Amino acid sequence: MRAVQVTEFGGPEVLVAVELPDPQAGPGEVLIEVDRIGVNYADTHQAENSYLSPSKLPLVPGGEVVGRTSEGKRVVALLNGGGGYAQLAVGTAPMTIDVPDDIDDLTALSFIVQGVTAWLLLRKSAHLEQGDSVVVHAAAGGVGTIAVQLAKAWGAGRVIATASSESKRELALELGADVAIDSRAEDMTAALREANGGKRVDVVLDMTGGATTDQSIAALAAFGRLAFYGMASREQPKAIEARNLLGHSTAVAGMWLPHVFSLPGNVFGRAMTELFELAQAGKIRAVTGGEYALSDARGAHEALRSRSTVGKLLLDPSR
């Protein structure tokens, strides 16, 4: 089968198209003939071995695929440990979800990681309440585009989006944000308060790190919550200290998607079902960030790392 393999850790240049033996499904596993592959920012960390879960060489990166089983059933799968950048992939039964006929590949792949991440951030990490003001950093990205829509669908008061370009801010507004501000603002604390009518904000969803996180914490209202799920800047925040949290009775929560499988009651399945239902009802939609050939996975990673993309990026394993 055609696949992309990493034999040395590094940037996009380490992604090399190769021919590999077909994988075999073991007990409790499902072999999937892949139609489309989802690309996540976490894949860039996996390729350079800076992810929370250490990578081992050689590796086929990628954690999500949509396709068909040997029985012809259409499924989307979250893969355990990678293997997604290939024409065939092996998923486990608990992390393989049937896809309704009226849900397209883009939507299924947008939900399996980014959608569930947005769902968990708002439901579990930030404990969104009716009327809360919500800040969504990187609002034009994969998680951000869905988080903006979910926050509005679930009764947020004022949704404040941040993005780095005018076109990205326009997209956030189209998706339901009440206001969109430049993510490069010199004083993000002041910008967020101004966007919220001079008041501190209740909820912040942040995957940037560094100064953005520090200044967002400073913008939180009493009992405000910042849900932290990534560090695209690759810079450590400095404000996550007890005195800063005590100063305004604020909370900071970290969220790593694999932990959803440690929760009782199949929370992962519940989240996917609710996301599909919201999409079928026309309340949320996936945003395409473009489709690349599998052989050009490097180009997809370069685009992600440049932070020039919007929505969900896909790879086509037939090319």
Image (cartoon, rainbow, N blue to C red):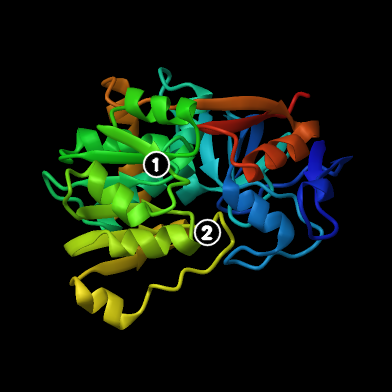
Would residue 217 be found to the left or right of residue 296 on screen? left
Q: Nearer the viewer, residue 277 or 169?
A: 169
In the image, is residue 169 above or below residue 220? above
Q: Nearer the viewer, residue 219 or 311?
A: 219
Residue found at x 32% / y 56%:
189
Whether residue 267 is visible here, answered yes or no, is no
Q: Nearer the viewer, residue 164 or 88?
A: 164
How busy is the neighbourhood of tag 1: few (under 14 within 10 Å), some, or many (20 plus)? many
Image depth: mark 1 or mark 2 in front: 1
Q: Which residue is mark 1?
A: 162
Q: Which residue is mark 2?
A: 231
Residue found at x 48% / y 38%:
142
How busy is the neighbourhood of tag 2: few (under 14 within 10 Å), some, or many (20 plus)? some
Q: Position of residue 75 (x, y in %)?
A: 51, 33
Would residue 159 be found to the left or right of residue 107 on screen? left
Residue found at x 37% / y 61%:
215
Q: Nearer the viewer, residue 278 or 25?
A: 278
Q: Residue furthest left?
A: 130
